[in-house]
Amino acid sequence: MTDTIQPLDVSGVTGAGGRGDVPPAVRMYEMLYSSLVSQLLIAVAELGVADAVGEAPTHVDDLAKATDSDPHALYRALRALASVGVFTEVVPRHFALTPLARTLRSDVPGSMRSLARYVGLPERQRSFGALAHSLRTGKPSFDHVHGQDWWSYFAAHPELASMFNSAMSSMARMVNGATLESYDLSDVRTLVDVGGGKGTLVATLLERYQEMHAVVFDLPRVVPEAAAHLDAAGVSGRVRCVGGNFLESVPAGGDTYVLSWTIHDWDDEDSVTILRNIRDVLPPDGRLIIIDEVLPEGDVPHFGKFEDIVMLTLLTGQVRTEAEFITLFERAGLRHVETRPTSSPTSVIVAVRD
Ligand SMILES: C[S@@+](CC[C@H](N)C(=O)[O-])C[C@H]1O[C@@H](n2cnc3c(N)ncnc32)[C@H](O)[C@@H]1O
C-alpha cells in the first residue's frame, strides 16, 4: 500500500486552466469522461469491494468471488480507480486499500459508502441526465423527470428517504470535526439544530460538552430516526427530537440555533422565511450559526460551485456567496457577525438579531 497518493486530476474541479501542458481537446476529452470516476466509485460501493479487501493485498479473483462479480471486469474497474488513487495494485492483480478506498468501507469512521450509494440513485442520475432542462428553465430537472418535487418524492418513498438521511449523516461527519476545530461552541446551553436530520451534529456536540442540551428539529418522518440515533449515542437524556415544518415555525428555547448543510436547499424566498422563523425565537443575546459552503467570487475554484449545480438540478436552492448570505440576513432582521473558513469545504457563518 502506498502512503503518498497523488490522484490524477480528471475531475475538472480543480481550476479553470487545468494541466497547462495538455492540449485543450485532450483536456476536454478527459473532462467529458470524468463522470466515469464517480460511476465506478458508485459501482464498487454498491458491490462492497472495499469491505472485501483484507489487511494484505487481495487477489482480484477473491474480490470477485466475495462480491459476486466478474473477475476481469472487476480488474478493469480497480485498475482504472487505482490510477486516480482509489485502491492500489501492489503486485499484479492484487489490490490493497488506499486512504481514499478505505472511506468506501462500511465499518470505518467517516465511511462514505452510504453517500456513494445515494449519489448513485437512479432518480438522481436521471435528473443529471436532464440538466439542460434546468439550464433552459432555471427549474429543477428532478421535478421535470419525476413529476413531483424532491421532498414530495422522498415523502412517498420512505426507503429512499432513509438512504438520504444516512448519506447526509456521512456529510455531517465530514464537516463536524472541521467545524468544531474552528468555532468554539463550549458556552452553548441549549442548541437547536434546525433541519438537524438524524442528529449527527447534536450527538457529536453532546458527547463533547456534558453540560449542553439540544433540540433536533426536522420533518416529523425524520424524528424516529433521529431519536434512535441519539439513543444509540447515549445522549438522549439531554436532547428532544421535535417534528415540524421550519417554513411555518421553529421551536423556541435555544440560545444557539444551527442550520447545517440545510439553507442551500432553499431559494431566497423560502430561506428568508426560515431565517425569520429562527429570528422570531432567537433571544436578544442568542446567535444563529450556519454551517455551509460560501462561494468565492469569480473563477476561484471551490467545490461548492459544483454542489450548487446539485441544488439547481434537484432542488430550488443554491449555494451562496458571503454577500448573498448578508442580503438574506438583512431581509430576515438578522445581522452578519463573521464568516469563518474551516478545513472542510464548509464555513461557519454567524448572525445575531439586528
Ligand atoms: C441536507 S439535509 C441536512 C441534514 C443535517 N443538518 C445534516 O447536516 O446532516 C436537510 C434537512 O432538512 C430537513 N427538512 C427539509 N424540509 C424541512 C422542513 N420543511 N422542515 C423541517 N426540516 C426540513 C430534511 O429532512 C433534512 O434532514
Image (tube, helix red, strand yellow):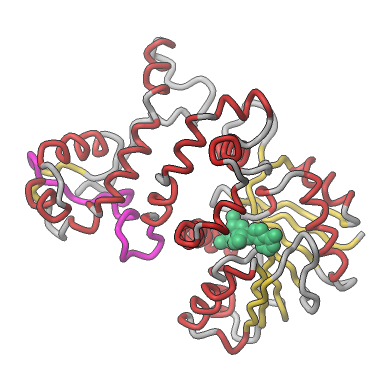
Please tell me in which quadrant of the rendered image residue 203 appears: bottom right
* Numbered label tally: 0
Residue beneath the point at 59% across and 68% down: 221
Q: Is residue 258 above or below residue 309?
A: below
18 horizontally vs 185: left or right: left
Q: Magenta stretch: residue 95 in it?
A: yes
Please tell me in which quadrant of the rendered image residue 284 appears: bottom right
Residue beneath the point at 21% across and 40% down: 78
In front: 84, or 268? 268
30 horizontally vs 250: left or right: left
Q: Residue furthest bottom?
A: 237
The magenta-colored residue range is 91-111
Q: Position of residue 185 (x, y in %)?
A: 67, 71
Q: Position of residue 256 (x, y in %)?
A: 75, 71
In front: 247, or 171? 247
Q: Position of residue 291 (x, y in %)?
A: 65, 56
On the question of residue 202 being in view, the answer is yes
Q: What secondary structure predominates along the stretch shown in magenta?
A: loop
Image region (quadrant) for ligand 1: bottom right
Residue beneath the point at 24% across and 38% down: 82
Q: Position of residue 117 (x, y in %)?
A: 38, 51
In front: 252, or 155? 155
Q: Is residue 210 above or below residue 6?
A: below
Q: Is residue 295 above or below residue 238?
A: above
